[in-house]
């Protein structure tokens, strides 16, 4: 049965008190904005009737709808109606499919005719927001998310994943129902009830933050549906080990640049993996292909990796609210690579400050060897497995209009009374009969060693001792917040409290009235705004902190209250000291520096204060919390959607797993197609690399193939012999090693062509050795070696390699930054020393190479294919070259793939649609490549060559060689060897000039 709807019209009586005043209606249904004032329904004024009227709004029939009116003035939000609770339109019914209008009785603005609705419980309609709860900025990081108002595209959804849901959940003892409200101290707390905004789904996934018995989980899950929240229930022991032992005791200190010996526990790491996997499972339950997934903070660093295992094309953003440590600190983490790789599985990684971004990029370079580059639009990018991961620097802020709603003069009477209760001790001290007027310096900090409160108190004590004039009439207000079981979660919280209380007792004893110290469970935003308006200066001496929005609140509170500007004294290690240019920045570890900043703030002229405040206020209004969320999700949404066929999972475990971008046409080599083409071809070319292709790859510094006793496996040599026994198949092994080494390894294979030193010397079958570029002068190598030797001595971890005709300086094991600087200087020195020689100096990833111009594997491959094709055309009878297979594993082999593809494309352009031969290029290992396909490893290469030799021995008589006929005769029981026709033999290969390539390459075998 289809859903019936009613056309709802609002009528409210209100006489405008000033010009530009407008009335809006907002409610719990999406058509009423889901309690979002930005999406509220505008009413028009009818002076004749003295009422404000709305256009008809579609709402479901048969349900109760809660709503409320708002006042705007000149386009800016002013206030909600001045009462607690919400208006309600009672349930109405209509026939399915019919449409009726519902016009409730005229309302009176600020007058609620019926008592407020009771507190929401499971099974009721959406919970009613209160004026104080609808626009709360976060008390710790200063952002109140407006995710419900974000437009993420047609059909798009945002799945916000955090360790703890931004909700306050309690169980009512009397009714056993769930009481739920938004946690206004959470960075992701919404300012309205959850639901759809402009038809866009927004979901929250996280733990409920309270212990929930197994029998109660179903009822809580149902209750959270009204908040578009999906709970993740963890076993108590797993959650304790995950959060207390790993996140708080290990990751939190490391991310704040503190290394604690013995803090890492493998069992805690397993719990961390288990919890992240459970979160991924919950996301998968609600995920749709068009969704955006936004994961938050260090609790869920593994989430992108687990999600990509299930959905290769998932669009994932990760934002880190904590600092990211320096690379030297992060490298002390036992599971550093697992964490880094997992973070890089996100499409975009966000940090609050560039300092943290720089630390992350440096860790990627030093630990994973990943380079970064700047992109247009102010982005940084990291290439990881063929994927381009965007790294964003985006500092969030506050919502000025929402903060203004919590100013003392804008609070409803009950909220104002509650706020006064929070600050009653301070007011009692200031309002005491014997108290003289005082200037307040204030700070609100969590009970945490990183907040540096001890340093602040010591500096204030020193200032009172050094400057007697501040002992009277000046009070430092220090409020410590010990919420979220802070004392239990922070290992040294009791020690921090003891240190602070010792200093507090000493200051109070020596300088009565100069310090007001209080420890509270929570300080609401309204109370903080009132404290900011009372304070001339705020002081924060944090020693390591990502973000603290209290300075932003302070600037807004003073400006919105029409009060004289104050001064913010901030530690240089706090996040917003880089943002608020009008603040005074000091080093909290220097008592003299803190004292100097405080004196400057107290003695600053009013005009300078106002100038500084104006600059900071302009920044705050231009960079709000909503802008931060919208900016991150817009950038994430703008990234090109991945296609399923373009990505492949590689590796196992968190340390080796990665998603590799292959391109639309990059697939495993179709061996069946290769065999069919090989069988039907008249003439064939097979080009093979050595190390990593026919045998396992070398290790770079130590190459076992260069040892005199190394032998190529007999199975490889046997396969090559079988291939080369067919005169219609021309096989060449191209290596970067020297002639003696390659000849010793493969010289026993008759008819095998060899190219050494990337093609500097080569021989066709059993012919003489010759040069790709005859007469090349190699005397320059002595000069290059002398220059490289100097830089090898000066660069720890660097070493030289002689690759036949080329010289290579490898710094992949050196310090990445210093190695790169030395490589750049070495390049300049080599270019100057070898200016007159036919040499090209190239800088690649981890190496500097000097080699002869015009010599590389691509030129050699193109030369060999050209020789075979020309010889085949001159044969009796003439037989075209119809098959080319090229297999390699490293970057120097990419030149072969590119050169052969370019040659084939050129042939197709000259000869029309039909190219001269089938070309198969394959790289060994699944990785980004210019090859058209890949083979898993060197064993697959040898297996494929074995199959080719078997196909060649049993192909049709039209293309039979003497070896094939002999095999067929032996299979039929005959022992006679047939004679080969002289006219069927291809002529010997002769040199033909070809166009040379000048592309760069890496040294390799």
Image (tube, rainbow, N blue to C red):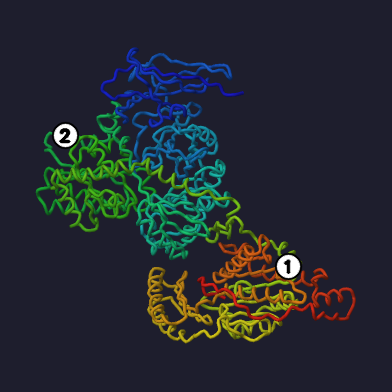
Give SS at disc 1.
Answer: helix
Residue 600 can be seen in this image: yes
Q: Residue at x 29, y 46 (%)?
A: 445
Where in the figure is residue 904, as x and y percent of width and height?
Answer: 63, 66
- Residue 678 tag number: 1
CA neighbours of label 1 inside 10 A, class few (<14), some (14 to 19), many (20+):
many
Foreground tag (1 vs 2): 1
Residue 195 can be seen in this image: no
State whether residue 849 is above or below residue 73: below
- Residue 44 tag number: none
Q: Residue at x 51, y 17 (%)?
A: 92
Q: Is 573 or 944 nearer to us in this picture?
A: 944
Where in the figure is residue 172, as x and y percent of width and height?
Answer: 45, 30
Q: Is 159 or 540 nearer to us in this picture?
A: 159
Q: Residue at x 13, y 46 (%)?
A: 605
**Residue occupied by mark 2:** 431
State whether residue 225 is above or below residue 243: above
Image quarter hosting the C terminus: bottom right
Where in the figure is residue 417, as x and y percent of width and height?
Answer: 27, 29
CA neighbours of label 2 inside 10 A, class few (<14), some (14 to 19), many (20+):
few
Give SS at disc 2.
Answer: loop
State whether residue 662 is above or below residue 77: below
Image quarter hosting the N terminus: top right
State whether residue 527 is above or below residue 108: below
Mark 1 to mark 2 CA distance (whole Å): 98 Å
Residue furthest left in the image:
469
Mark with earlier residue (1, 2): 2
Where in the figure is residue 772, as x and y percent of width and height?
Answer: 57, 80
- Which quadrant holds residue 977? bottom right
371 relative position to 737: left or right: left
Q: Are marks 1 and 2 in contact (CB under 8 Å)?
A: no
388 relative position to 610: left or right: right
């Amino acid at each position: 049965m289809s859903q019936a709807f009613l056309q709802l019209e609002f009528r409210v009586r209100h006489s405008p008190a000033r010009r530009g005043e407008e009335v809006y209606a907002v409610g719990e249904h999406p058509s009423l904005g889901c309690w979002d004032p930005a999406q509220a329904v505008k009413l028009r004024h009818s002076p004749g009737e003295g009422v404000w009227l709305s256009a008809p709004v579609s709402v479901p029939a048969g349900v109760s709808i809660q709503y409320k009116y708002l006042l705007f003035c000149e386009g800016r939000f002013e206030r909600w109606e001045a009462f607690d609770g919400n208006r309600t339109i009672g349930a109405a019914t209509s026939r399915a499919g019919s449409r009726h209008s519902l016009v409730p009785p005229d309302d009176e603005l600020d007058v609620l005719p019926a008592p407020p609705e009771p507190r929401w419980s499971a099974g009721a309609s959406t919970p009613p927001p209160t004026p104080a709860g609808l626009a709360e900025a976060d008390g710790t990081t200063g952002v109140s998310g407006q995710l419900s108002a974000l437009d993420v595209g047609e059909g798009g959804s945002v799945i916000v994943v955090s360790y703890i849901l931004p909700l306050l959940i309690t169980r009512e003892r009397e009714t056993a129902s769930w009481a739920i409200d938004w946690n206004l101290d959470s960075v992701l707390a919404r300012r309205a009830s959850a639901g759809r905004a402009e038809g866009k789904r927004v979901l929250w996934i996280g733990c409920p933050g309270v212990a929930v018995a197994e029998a109660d989980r179903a009822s809580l899950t149902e209750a959270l549906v009204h908040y578009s929240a999906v709970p993740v229930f963890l076993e108590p022991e797993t959650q304790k080990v995950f959060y207390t032992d790993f996140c708080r005791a290990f990751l939190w200190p490391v991310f704040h640049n503190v290394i604690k010996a013995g803090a890492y526990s493998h069992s805690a790491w397993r719990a961390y993996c288990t919890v992240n996997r459970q979160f991924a499972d919950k996301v998968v339950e609600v995920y749709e292909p068009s969704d955006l997934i936004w994961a938050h903070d260090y609790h869920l660093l593994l989430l992108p990796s687990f999600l990509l295992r299930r959905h290769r094309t998932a669009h994932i953003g990760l934002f880190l609210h904590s600092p990211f440590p320096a690379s030297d600190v992060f490298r002390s983490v036992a599971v550093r690579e697992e964490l880094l790789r997992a973070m890089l599985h996100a499409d975009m990684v966000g940090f609050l400050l560039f300092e943290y971004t720089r630390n992350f990029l440096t860790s990627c370079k030093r630990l994973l060897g990943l380079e970064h580059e700047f992109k247009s639009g102010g982005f940084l990018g990291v290439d990881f497995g063929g994927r381009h991961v965007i790294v964003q620097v985006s500092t969030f802020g506050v919502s000025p209009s929402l903060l203004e709603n919590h100013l003392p003069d804008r609070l409803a009477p009950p909220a104002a009374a509650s706020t006064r209760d929070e600050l009653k001790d301070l007011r009692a001290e200031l309002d005491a009969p014997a108290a003289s007027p005082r200037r307040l310096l204030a700070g609100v900090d969590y009970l945490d060693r990183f907040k540096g409160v001890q340093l602040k108190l010591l500096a204030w004590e020193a200032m009172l001792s050094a400057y007697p004039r501040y002992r009277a009439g000046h009070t430092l207000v220090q409020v410590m917040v010990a919420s979220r079981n802070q004392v239990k979660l922070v290992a040294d919280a009791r020690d921090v409290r003891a240190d602070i209380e010792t200093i507090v007792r000493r200051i109070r004893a020596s300088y009565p009235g100069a310090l007001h110290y209080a420890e509270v469970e929570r300080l609401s935003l309204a109370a903080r705004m009132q404290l900011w308006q009372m304070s001339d200066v705020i002081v924060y001496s944090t020693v390591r902190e990502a973000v603290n929005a209290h300075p932003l609140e302070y600037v807004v509170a003073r400006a919105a209250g029409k009060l004289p500007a104050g001064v913010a004294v901030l530690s240089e290690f706090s996040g917003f000291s880089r943002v608020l240019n009008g603040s005074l920045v000091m080093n909290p570890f220097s008592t003299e520096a803190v004292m100097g900043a405080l004196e400057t703030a107290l003695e600053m002229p009013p005009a300078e204060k106002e100038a500084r405040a104006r600059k900071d206020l302009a920044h705050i209004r231009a960079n709000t919390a909503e802008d931060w969320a919208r900016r991150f999700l817009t950038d994430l949404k703008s990234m090109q959607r991945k296609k399923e066929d373009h990505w492949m999972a590689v590796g196992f475990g968190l340390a080796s797993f990665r998603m590799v971008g292959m391109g639309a046409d990059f697939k495993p080599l179709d061996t069946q197609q290769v065999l069919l083409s090989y069988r039907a071809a008249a003439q064939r070319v097979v080009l093979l690399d050595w190390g990593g292709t026919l045998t396992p790859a070398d290790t770079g510094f130590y190459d076992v193939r260069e040892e005199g006793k190394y032998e190529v496996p007999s199975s490889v040599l046997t396969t090559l012999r079988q291939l080369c026994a067919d005169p219609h198949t021309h096989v060449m092994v191209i290596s970067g090693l020297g002639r003696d080494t390659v000849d010793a390894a493969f010289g026993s294979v008759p008819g095998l062509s060899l190219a050494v030193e990337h093609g500097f010397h080569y021989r066709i079958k059993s012919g003489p050795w010759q040069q790709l570029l005859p007469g090349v002068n190699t005397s320059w190598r002595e000069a290059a070696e002398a220059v490289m030797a100097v830089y090898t001595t000066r660069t720890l971890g660097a070493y030289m390699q002689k690759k036949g005709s080329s010289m290579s300086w490898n710094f992949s094991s050196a310090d990445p930054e210093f190695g790169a600087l030395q490589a750049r200087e070495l390049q300049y020195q080599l270019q100057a020393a070898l200016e007159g020689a036919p040499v090209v100096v190239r800088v690649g990833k981890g190496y500097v190479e000097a080699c002869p111009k015009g010599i590389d594997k691509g030129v050699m491959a193109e030369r060999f294919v050209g020789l075979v094709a020309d010889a085949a055309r001159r044969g009796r009878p003439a037989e075209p070259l119809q098959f080319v297979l090229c297999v390699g594993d490293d970057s120097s082999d990419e030149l072969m793939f590119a050169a052969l593809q370019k040659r084939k494309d050129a042939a197709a352009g000259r000869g029309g649609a039909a190219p001269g031969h089938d070309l198969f290029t394959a790289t060994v290992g699944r990785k980004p490549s210019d090859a058209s396909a890949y083979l898993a490893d060197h064993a697959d290469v040898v297996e494929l060559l074995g199959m080719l030799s078997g196909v060649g021995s049993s192909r049709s008589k039209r293309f039979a060689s003497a070896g094939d006929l002999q095999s067929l005769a032996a299979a039929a029981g005959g022992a006679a060897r047939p004679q080969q026709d002289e006219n069927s033999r291809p002529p010997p290969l002769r040199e033909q000039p070809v166009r040379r390539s000048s592309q760069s390459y890496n040294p390799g075998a």
